[in-house]
Amino acid sequence: MSEDVRLTPPPKRAPIDALTGLRFLAASWVVLYHYAGAALPSGTPAGLRNAVGHGYVGVNFFYLLSGFILAYNYAEGAPGAVRMRGTKRAFWKNRLSRIYPMYLAAWLLAAPFVVAHRFATDASSFVALAKLGVAALVSLGLVQAWLPGANAWWNPPGWSISVEAFFYAVFPWVLPRIAASRRSRVVLGLAAWGGSLVVPALYVARGGGELALAAVKYEPLLHLPTFLLGILLAEVFDSKHKPLLARCRVPLGIAALLAVVVCVRVPAGFAYPLIHNGLLSPAFGGILLAVALGIPLLSPLLASRGAVLLGEASYALYILQAPLWLTWRKVALGLTPGIDFAVFFVMLCLASVGAHRFIEVPAQRWLRRRELHLVE
């Protein structure tokens, strides 16, 4: 969600604009999952309904993309001696300036709804204030994903930004260690993929309550293998095998896309925790590599000016979706469900582009100027 393929400094590598456009499609899939289900007509084919119902996997795609883009932008050095470009402090300052201004804006937009809900549902004002205080601290501190059941205490989509913050914290250490490993990238990739599925598989096998499922779905450590897989994909993208991959990019992309389509056309059922936590990561990785290498017609379309603009605003679209949906519910124009969602989605896109241009980018530049001033 939060990886900006074009703005992420240091700008020493050409941006992969097609991946920016692809971000918008992934973010939109998540929005469809959250709000479009009730808008589908009663005669909607089961396959399409299931595809919308699997939109949560868009978050998994973002974790993969995050590892790929960070490694693509920040890795430097010869194979076996790769290091992170720049200092850890500069990296963390940069990532914080990237995610927090828009995150805070969405947090403030959600605040009136959170406060109203707490006072409407809690037995006393004291209890409501206590819960609000804890929820505010947890969400502002970006630690809600570490606490099972706390992910929805404020702005629910923010849980994934809490996971991203953990990735940023460990990236300066994991990048050189992955690069220094002499094991085959295929072996490491399979290990990362398998690692993402161990705990979800145990949950499926043994069962558990809602709290256990929340821990499986949201715990940052359980999503780290997917992020590491993204780093490995960036290594493969820059490796000596790139010419071979480029020749195979079209069948690779088609095969990966078909794998996703087949999976999301059937109900998740018992496999839901596995799908949520990385079962589709290899297929998403294939799509990511194919688009980055350049699929005829598709990659140029995703790299077009309009697609890139929407992709740049996709983080704002993702993090603003819940508070803007709640605001839209207050309008209640009496539209049919399908039209109601369509109008909301268009307005969300416009609001996201505006928020990106007038909140996210100016705040990011201001924070970076302050950092440069402090260094000087």
Image (cartoon, rainbow, N blue to C red):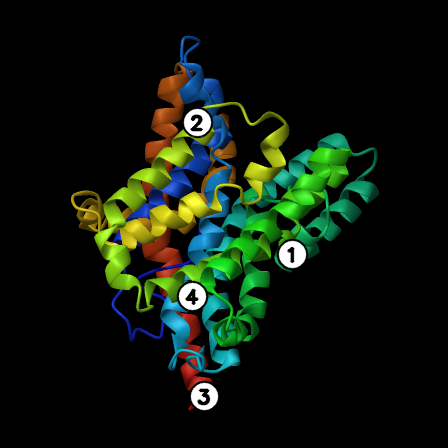
Q: Looking at the image, is mark 3 or mark 2 earlier in the sequence?
A: 2
The crowd level at tag 2 (other Cα within 10 Å; few <14, some 14-19, many 20+) is: many
Q: Looking at the image, is mark 2 or mark 1 earlier in the sequence?
A: 2
- Say if mark 4 contacts mark 2, CB within 8 Å: no
> Which is more foreground, mark 3 or mark 4?
4
For the point 42% across and 17% down, the residue is: 40
Q: Alpha carbon of mark 1 to alpha carbon of mark 4: how far?
A: 18 Å
Q: Looking at the image, is mark 1 or mark 3 earlier in the sequence?
A: 1
The numbered mark at residue 51 is: 2
Task: Please tell me whether mark 2 sits on a helix, a strand or a loop.
Answer: helix
Q: Which residue type does callout 4 highlight?
A: Leu
> x, y (%) of residue 100?
51, 60
Front residue (pair 318, 277)? 277
> Which is more foreground, mark 3 or mark 2?
2
Q: Alpha carbon of mark 4 to alpha carbon of mark 2: how far?
A: 29 Å
Residue furthest top in the image: 43
> x, y (%) of residue 167?
55, 62
> x, y (%) of residue 184?
47, 65
Q: Which residue type does callout 1 highlight?
A: Leu
Q: Looking at the image, is mark 4 or mark 2 earlier in the sequence?
A: 2
Residue furthest bottom in the image: 376
The crowd level at tag 1 (other Cα within 10 Å; few <14, some 14-19, many 20+) is: some
Residue 244, quarter of the rendered image? bottom left
Q: Which residue is mark 3?
A: 375
Q: Which residue is mark 4?
A: 70
